[in-house]
């Protein structure tokens, strides 16, 4: 199992500096958030990643969708949904140019002006259009459950994957989100064997999406050991990205997180 990091662990750290921190932690992979300014900077991002001897392993849409309330794949407003699908498509173009195999999305907030049934129907239709584009450009689209959105559990995310039924669409398992939803992280691996596309590793107090290092929080060493054992048994061949927010001190926390995980799987 190869570990990497998401690159948005601090707003005070530029993407280039984040790449340097990740490389210094002994990792070879980094995720990039599909921020608006990045969509037209694929070449510069690729050069910066190469300078730190990193591969861009995934492009994430959670951060830009969380920061911009005008983006929503399940909005009651059809024009908002269409613009959001276009944004996801541009992010897939960015991923393709960077050589990143994975693009992932999530529902970051509830739709206030529609019932949950209506919101999920809209989300499903948007995801189907995104999955079709993913197949066209040769990337994999993954849906991530998110505690504050319309898709808060692995069960709900896997149901959408079954409904859309595309070879270019699957799930992302996030250990921190599973801890909040109360779903056993090892059981989620077993149940997602055929549709698992990507993995995020982080910890929290079981209540809030705090993105603590794996060595701190509700999830124990035994929880993570069982999680990675099930990943190995399932034949998962992707990477695991550690997703932290505001780690302090940055360099030491990143290095300690990787050491902790590598010790668990050794």
Image (cartoon, helix red, strand yellow):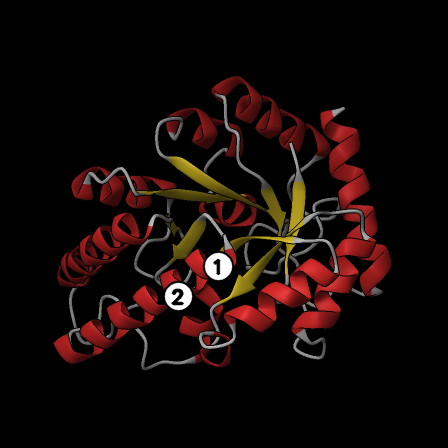
Q: CB under 8 Å between callouts 1 and 2?
A: yes
11 vs 25, nearest the viewer: 25
Percent position of residue 154, x then y: 38, 42
Which mark is drawn over residue 8? none
Tag 1 secondary structure: strand
2 vs 252, nearest the viewer: 2
Is residue 60 visible to us here? no
Which residue shows up at 16% across the image and 79% down it?
79
First in residue order: circle 1 vs circle 2: 1
Quickly name the residue at label 2.
91
Is residue 175 visible to us here? yes
Quickly name the residue at label 1.
59
Q: Tell me the distance, in whole angstroms, between the alpha carbons under discs 1 and 2.
A: 7 Å
238 vs 180, nearest the viewer: 238
Q: How many callouts does the rendering have?
A: 2
Quadrant in which the C terminus appears:
top right
Badge 1: residue crowd in 10 Å (few <14, some 14–19, many ≥20): many
Percent position of residue 27, x then y: 74, 47
Badge 2: residue crowd in 10 Å (few <14, some 14–19, many ≥20): many
Percent position of residue 45, x then y: 59, 69
User: From what the image shows, is residue 229 above or below residue 106?
Assistant: above
Where on the picture, by quarter, is residue 228? top right
Percent position of residue 156, x then y: 29, 45
Tag 2 secondary structure: helix
Determine whether, in the image, residue 126 is placed left or right of residue 199.
Answer: left
Determine whether, in the image, residue 97 is placed left or right of residue 215.
Answer: left
Which residue shows up at 82% across the image and 50% down it?
255
Which residue shows up at 61% across the image and 48% down it?
241
Quadrant in which the N terminus appears:
top right
User: From what the image shows, is residue 1 above or below residue 40?
Assistant: above
Which residue shows up at 20% across the image and 38% down it?
165
């Amino acid at each position: 199992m190869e570990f990497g990091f998401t690159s948005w662990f601090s707003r005070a750290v530029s993407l280039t500096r984040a790449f340097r921190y990740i490389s210094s932690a002994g990792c070879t992979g980094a995720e990039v958030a599909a921020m608006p300014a990045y969509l037209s900077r694929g070449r510069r991002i690729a050069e910066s990643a190469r300078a730190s001897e990193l591969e861009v392993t995934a492009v994430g849409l959670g951060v830009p969708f969380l920061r911009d309330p005008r983006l929503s794949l399940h909005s009651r407003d059809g024009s908002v949904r269409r613009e959001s699908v276009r944004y996801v498509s541009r992010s897939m173009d960015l991923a393709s140019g960077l050589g990143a195999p994975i693009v992932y999305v999530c529902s970051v907030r509830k739709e206030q002006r529609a019932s949950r049934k209506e919101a999920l129907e809209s989300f499903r239709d948007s995801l189907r259009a995104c999955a079709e584009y993913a197949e066209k450009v040769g990337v994999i689209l993954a849906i991530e459950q998110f505690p504050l959105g319309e898709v808060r559990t692995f069960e709900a995310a896997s149901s959408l994957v079954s409904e859309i039924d595309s070879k270019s669409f699957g799930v992302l398992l996030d250990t921190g989100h599973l801890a909040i939803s109360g779903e056993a992280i090892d059981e989620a691996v077993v149940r997602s064997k055929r549709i698992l596309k990507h993995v995020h590793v982080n910890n929290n107090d079981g209540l809030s999406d705090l993105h603590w290092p794996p060595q701190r929080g509700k999830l124990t060493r035994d929880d993570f050991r069982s999680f990675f054992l099930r990943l190995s048994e399932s034949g998962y061949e992707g990477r695991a990205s550690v997703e932290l927010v505001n780690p302090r001190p940055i360099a030491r926390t990143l290095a300690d997180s990787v050491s902790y995980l590598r010790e668990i799987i050794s």
